[in-house]
Image (spheres, grey):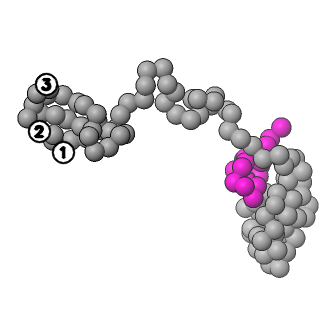
Amino acid sequence: MPEPGWYDDPESAIHLRYWDGGQWTAERTPKPPPAGAPTSPAAAVGAHARPRSEKSFVATLLLAILLGAFGVHRFYVGKAGTGVLMLLTLGGFGIWQLIDIIMIAVGNFTDNQGLPIKVS
């Protein structure tokens, strides 16, 4: 019989399970990454390698400021459904337009694929 300790879980390929010397216990823990492997996807590709939208930050911001009440900036980034809603409500009576301008300015606005608008 093996010594007490942590071994590959016979019921799960992604866990380790504790063997007390006579039987498996209920204690489980995720397997650690292999030595030298990155610990997160960001570490694997670099901290700033997050994919970005091809839509222009400056164009999106200007459209939101100048024509945001009509939802033009949302049509530009491919969000036609919410663009129509903004058009019908005149930018959510200005509130939605203001929120979008702030979201764009701080870099939290995304296109229709969920990608952040590129800053440069």
Where residue 17 appears, as percent x and y from the top left, is 24, 37
Segment colored magenta = 102-120
**For the residue carrying disc 3, how many other residues have a C-alpha within 10 Å: few (<14), some (14-19), or many (20+)?**
few
The answer to if 87 sits in the magenta stretch is: no
Compared to 2, does 50 lie above or below?
Answer: below
Q: Residue furthest left?
A: 22
Packing grade of label 2 (10 A; few <14, some 14-19, many >=20) is few
Q: Nearer the viewer, mark 3 or mark 1?
A: 3
Q: Main secondary structure of the magenta part?
A: loop
Q: Disc 2, disc 3: CB below 8 Å?
A: no
The residue pinned by badge 3 equals 3
Separation of disc 2 and disc 3 at Cα?
A: 11 Å
Amino acid at circle 2: Gln
Secondary structure of residue under mark 1: strand
The label shown at residue 44 is none
63 sits to left or right of 41: right
Answer whether residue 68 is visible to the viewer in this image: no
- From the viewer's perspective, is 99 left or right of 80? left
At a point 37% along the width and 39% down the height, the residue shown is 14
Q: Which residue is mark 1?
A: 26
Query: Mark 1: which amino acid?
Result: Ala
**Between discs 2 and 3, the one toward the N terminus:** 3
Q: CA distance from mark 2 to mark 1?
A: 10 Å
> Up-down: is 108 above or below 32?
below
Task: Identify the disc placed on residue 23.
Answer: 2
